[in-house]
Amino acid sequence: MQFGHFDDRAKEYVITRPNTPRPWSNYLGSLDYGAIITNNAGGYSFYKSALSSRFLRLRSNSVPMDQPGRYFYLRDQVTGDFWSSSWQPVGKPLSKYKSTCRHGTAYTIITSRYSAIETESTYFVPLGQAFEYWRLKVTNKSKQPRTLALFTYCEMASPWHMPNDLTNLQYSQFITKATVDQEMLGMAVHPYHAFDPQNLMGCHRLWMTLVGAPLIGYETVRERFLGSVYHTYANPQAVIEGRCSNFLAEGENAIGTLQTEITLQPGETRELIAMLGLGTPESHGYAARAEFGTPERCEAELQKLKQHWHSLLGAVKVKTPDAEFDAMANTWGAYNALITYTWSRHASLIYNGERDGLGFRDTVQDFLGAMPMLREQIRERLELMLTGQVSNGGAMPVVAPFSHQPGTMPPPKREEYRSDDCQWFFNAIPDYVAETGDLDFYRKVLPYADQGEATVLGHLRRALEFNLERSGKNGLPCGLHADWNDCVKMGYNGESVMVAEQLRFGLATYATIAEKLHAVYCPGDATPSSRPPDHGEDAAAPAPSSYLAEAAWARTELTRLEAAIQKAAWDGEWFLWAIGEDGYRYGSKTESEGKIYINTQVWAVMSGAATPEQGRKCMDALKRDLATPYGIMLSAPPFTHTPPTVMGGVIYNHGIKENAGIFCHTQSWAVIAEAMLGNGDQAYDYYRAFMPAAYNTRAELREIEPYVHCQTTYATCNRNAGKSRVPWLSGTASWSHHTALQWILGVRPELDGLRIDPCIPRSWPGFTMTRVFRGKTIRIEVKNPNGVSKGVGSLVINGKKIDGNLAPLDRLTDGTKVVATLG
Ligand code: IFM
């Protein structure tokens, strides 16, 4: 069943049936002002933190699950019939009510037609501003004049702290106070507390205004608007009666209802604008209304917003034979990666603001997806995360951006360290350096979270040492509190095969970086220095000649680790996932639960830990035992009897999340592994199995937005098979976008140029990509005349043939045309 379609040109997803299987949502706003909206105008708003600076309320996991929101109610003043400009909350019969929703890049436009009245409501936050626009256009399509009462509705949090607002009612119901004048409503929470207009986070002040028609009434208390505690958003008494009571809140649940009345001649359109913003009317509201409160300015701001996002997304444009793949690569995958990067795991309909810190491992992985669009802009967050590393090489589990003070943070307790956290730097940092060319970044000195400082290279070295120093009886890194899989509990000193593979990757990457630093900063000096490595007290005075020694150190450790992995973790057909403190081998063919695990197969290939034979063998086993039409299960068979002290995933039903679910985050790793092995058909099949757009025509199966990635999908061993859950904020978004561009299409930034190394389905005749790289627009064409998957046979740059598959930096100027022919 199809509920909508991709409008690629407008970069919009158009929902044509409002009764989607679940609310399908979008994000408004910026890095500061966050807002979520669904196809039925449900959602909430917050400033910087959905937890501690939440000002529009949503009751999570309620029914319907996206209410309240930002509503316009309409009432025919002659007949008394009423409806809303989004299908919900009034929910008129769909035989009489038509609606579309266009989710665009940080804006949403909902249209309706009911009773010969058309509406178009547009929601967005103008760039750099601390208010939201709700623009309503109303058109009379009937043959008679129509008089309509119009009401806005939103529910304000009191206080601006999500859990307190929803649970601490003995306090929250008594702290709101409204003011009003001819044009503006003011709402204060803690009305007698001082207000600092310079600091809007948690400022507890809102203003709301309506332009385009006179304010004839208002309501500021929810129960007065609804009429009684037994009414709902579907039948508010004020709308039924066509009249507000003009009551100013002094306590109770605060709302923003502004009422007006318009008379429309046949064919006439009226445009109204509601504005809701942070601060008081005096501090921000009147000025914003004066400057932004006209239809022309509103439209100009919308265009500015679109241009901003389209130019960000315009960093990469692809054209392949698969239109659904293109819709993801050009718009929705990129947008999803940026949204995930921005809001981490704290603001969606599922993550309802229960935390506002940056989970270490997730955030470091999120850099990958956002890299092609944000490039240098990523650096500030990257530095923040590096300062979340502790001087012992481990990491704070969560970096709280609002209170993080590098050099002064108490380090985590021993049992709180995750074993994988800092290993993700070996993906993110080289990708940043390759994208920007900023090799000097490795020499930047940054503090640790608790004490001391080091160059970025020094931070990387500590990351490696952290795991090397915490190795178990078999010479593999200990799992500590957890590895990537939060549920794997092999005992603090039990060993994680995945982290061993990550560590192998990290050591190899470190050696390459050190060699590069040597080549660039001390060319001609071939003598490894005996000086201490580039960290700790020596950080401020890096010793360039030690780079070769660093590389040699890493390669020695790598050789030792590789032997340990081979000895302890290869099970004959695939790699184990863990070895317990007691020596128990998890993920062996002798097991009846959790016998085979995706992560240690794919990372064996990605890290180079697997021999070519092992790589093929374990990926074949993975396909046989874990692949389903909806994606690859995390492990199988599901856990039933394994104690939760070993595998926390046993708390979940079979076939979801960490208990043999399809964990979408990991899918890209299988795609990369197959691409590295040269199997383009398989890589692409795996990619499409979890690609949202591939489900557009059967969206009832997946249920969530066909333009958004999700965290997890029910596997075939569960009766909900195919249903996806936890949309938007997931490592899936970051890795899948990175994988599409760098591993399927295979265009990989490197320090010295662009590597062109596609691994595509054999049936593709080729593809094109336009990509901004180091400020230049590069046009790439890949031809596949012989129907192969991989292997560039010839590379031609601006008409000149060159050897290999690296388009070197000195050949790349703005507009350069690169033609790669496979086979
Ligand atoms: O890797 C974790 C992630 O950090 C949080 N969500 C679950 C994933 C797998 O356990």
Image (cartoon, rainbow, N blue to C red):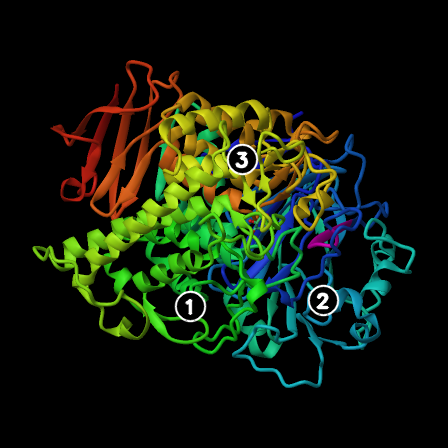
According to the image, label 2 marks what residue?
A: 157
Q: Position of residue 767 (x, y in %)?
A: 34, 26
Identify which residue, 568 or 733, lies in the foreground.
568
Residue stretch in magenta: 67-74
Of tags 1 and 2, the one toward the viewer is 1
Instruction: Sort mark 2 into few (<14), some (14-19) or many (20+) by Cα contacts within 10 Å.
Output: many
Label 1 to label 3, Cα distance in Å? 32 Å
Secondary structure beneath label 2: loop
Contact between labelled residues 3 and 1, with CB atoms less than 8 Å apart: no
Identify which residue, 144 or 610, lies in the foreground.
610
According to the image, label 3 marks what residue?
A: 598
Instruction: Sort mark 3 into few (<14), some (14-19) or many (20+) by Cα contacts within 10 Å.
Output: many
Secondary structure beneath label 1: loop
Is residue 328 found left or right of 744 in the rendered image?
right
Q: Which is more N-terminal, label 3 or label 1?
A: 1
Name the residue rendered at 47%, 52% in the picture. Answer: 477
